[in-house]
């Protein structure tokens, strides 16, 4: 009989235990950067997470016979997305476990049972009850490459725990990397030069004083460029403004730019300074004291990496070298500032080979790899990988 006891996270004590566990698991791992407690909690707050308007979630901790917390997990149902798959699919995330398959199985079983009760026939993980720019995926290659802000990190044995339970890779998440000073391949450089020299094109960096105007330009391009993606949902003005307002405290205006032709927005590139070196020192708590520390450390901690969050080009302007022109322009500014050294693109799914080809074509290389796993509850159902998008 198992001595493991599962408990719903309900009390303040439970919440503290939920956040304490990673510090025990990663105590000797110098590559780990704690997730920000307040950001994690906002995922489970009905007043802060808009996904509660069309979804539900639950989380648990697992306690052993010595009353020690040895694992945690959360499960989610996004009703808008769940039934777009052949099997209604929920998700699991925020998984942490000691290196023990019984512990992992107990956590996965709890999530699976809860998801079945809520009409699901499969589960993806580790994912977030929200957007995929944070808390998404399992690191499966290159554990020594410094993680970027918002990236999941885990021990190598998590891959074994997931796969032994029956999870299969639904898609890979490719982390692309390049040095800023590295030259752009010649064929892209020629196209980029033509764009830069053409007076009908203008490249502008963001002005945070006019952030709502740029948010609307971003929305305009995004809705046109992503419309062919699976499960696409048109972005509202409110959502676009919210994204930019959340980024505002850490925006470096030199890293966010838009292309216009002649006055119509046709492309964007969003980059932010990688603040993980600061977050590591804050140790996962961005309370009032943590915010004071952040402001203080921001003046002294050297940040040399840029996180490439997103790039988008209006469909009729794709394949013209716009991406190369954007990166040439960004690299020129970054090198002149003598501040940033390298860029990490956060992340490209292997289901989007067209985008991955563009990054490789302008000199990026895959530096590390993550995976989104899927477990179909009925073993008689044939497993299928994530469908390819942007085939044309």
Image (tube, rainbow, N blue to C red):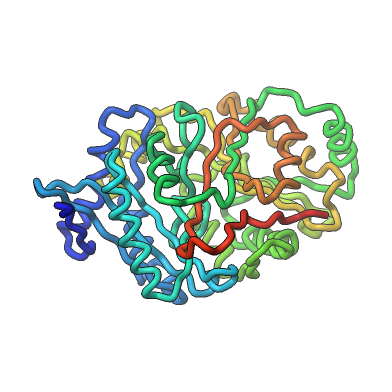
Residue located at (28% from left, 28% from top): 28
Residue 383 vs residue 387: left or right?
A: left
Question: Can you see residue 50?
Answer: no
* Residue 220 occupies quadrant: bottom right
Residue 55 at x, y = what percent? 43, 73
| Residue 182, placed above or below residue 289 | above
Q: Quadrant of the C terminus?
A: bottom right
Identify which residue, 242 or 143, lies in the foreground: 143
291 or 46: nearer the viewer: 46
Seen from the viewer's position, the closer of residues 317 and 68 is 68
How many numbered discs, if any?
0
Viewer can see residue 140: yes
Give the residue displayed 84% in from the left and 39% down from the top.
196
| Furthest residue toward left | 66
* Along the viewing direction, whichever of 385 and 256 lies nearer the viewer: 385
Residue at 28% over, 52% down: 72
- Residue 126 in the image: above or below residue 33: below
Q: Is residue 300 left or right of residue 132?
A: left
Rendering quarter of residue 253: top right
Q: Residue at x 40, y 55 (%)?
A: 93
Picture coordinates of residue 197 (x, y %)? 89, 38
The quadrant of the picture occupied by the N terminus is bottom left
Residue 257, percent from left and from top: 68, 46
Q: As displayed, is residue 294 above or below residue 249?
A: above
In this picture, residue 208 sits left or right of residue 259: left
Q: Position of residue 187 (x, y in %)?
A: 87, 31
């Amino acid at each position: 009989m198992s001595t493991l006891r599962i408990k719903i996270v309900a009390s303040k004590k439970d919440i503290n235990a939920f956040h304490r566990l990673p510090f025990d698991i990663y105590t000797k791992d110098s590559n780990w950067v704690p997730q920000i407690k307040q950001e994690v909690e906002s995922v489970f707050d009905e007043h802060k997470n808009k996904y509660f308007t069309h979804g539900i979630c639950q989380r648990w901790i697992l306690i052993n016979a010595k009353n020690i917390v040895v694992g945690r997990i959360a499960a989610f149902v996004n009703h808008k997305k769940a039934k777009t798959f052949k099997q209604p699919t929920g998700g699991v995330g925020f998984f942490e476990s000691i290196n023990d398959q019984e512990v992992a199985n107990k956590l996965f079983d709890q999530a699976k049972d809860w998801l079945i009760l809520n009409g699901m026939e499969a589960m993806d993980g580790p994912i977030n009850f929200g957007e995929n720019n944070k808390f998404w995926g399992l690191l499966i290659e290159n554990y020594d490459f410094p993680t970027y802000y918002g990236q999941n990190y885990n021990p190598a044995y998590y891959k074994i725990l997931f796969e032994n339970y029956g999870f299969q890779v639904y898609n890979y998440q490719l982390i692309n990397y390049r040095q800023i000073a590295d030259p752009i391949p010649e064929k892209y450089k020629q196209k980029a030069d033509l764009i830069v020299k053409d007076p009908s094109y203008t490249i502008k960096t963001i002005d945070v004083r006019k952030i709502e105007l740029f948010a609307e330009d971003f929305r305009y391009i995004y809705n046109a460029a992503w419309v062919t993606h699976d499960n696409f949902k048109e972005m509202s003005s409110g959502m676009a403004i919210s994204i930019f307002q959340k980024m505002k405290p850490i925006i470096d205006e030199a890293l966010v730019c838009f292309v216009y032709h002649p006055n119509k927005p046709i492309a964007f590139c969003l980059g932010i300074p990688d603040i993980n070196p600061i977050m590591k020192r804050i140790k996962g708590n961005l309370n009032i004291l943590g915010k004071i520390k952040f402001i203080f450390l921001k003046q002294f901690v050297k940040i040399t990496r840029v996180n490439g969050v997103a790039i988008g080009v209006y469909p009729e302007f794709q394949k013209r070298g716009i991406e190369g022109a954007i990166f040439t322009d960004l690299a020129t500014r970054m090198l002149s500032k003598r501040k940033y050294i390298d860029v990490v693109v956060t992340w490209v799914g292997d289901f989007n080979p067209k985008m991955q080809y563009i990054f490789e074509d302008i000199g990026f290389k895959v530096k590390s790899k993550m995976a989104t796993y899927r477990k179909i509850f009925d073993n008689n159902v044939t497993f299928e990988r994530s469908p390819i998008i942007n085939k044309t």
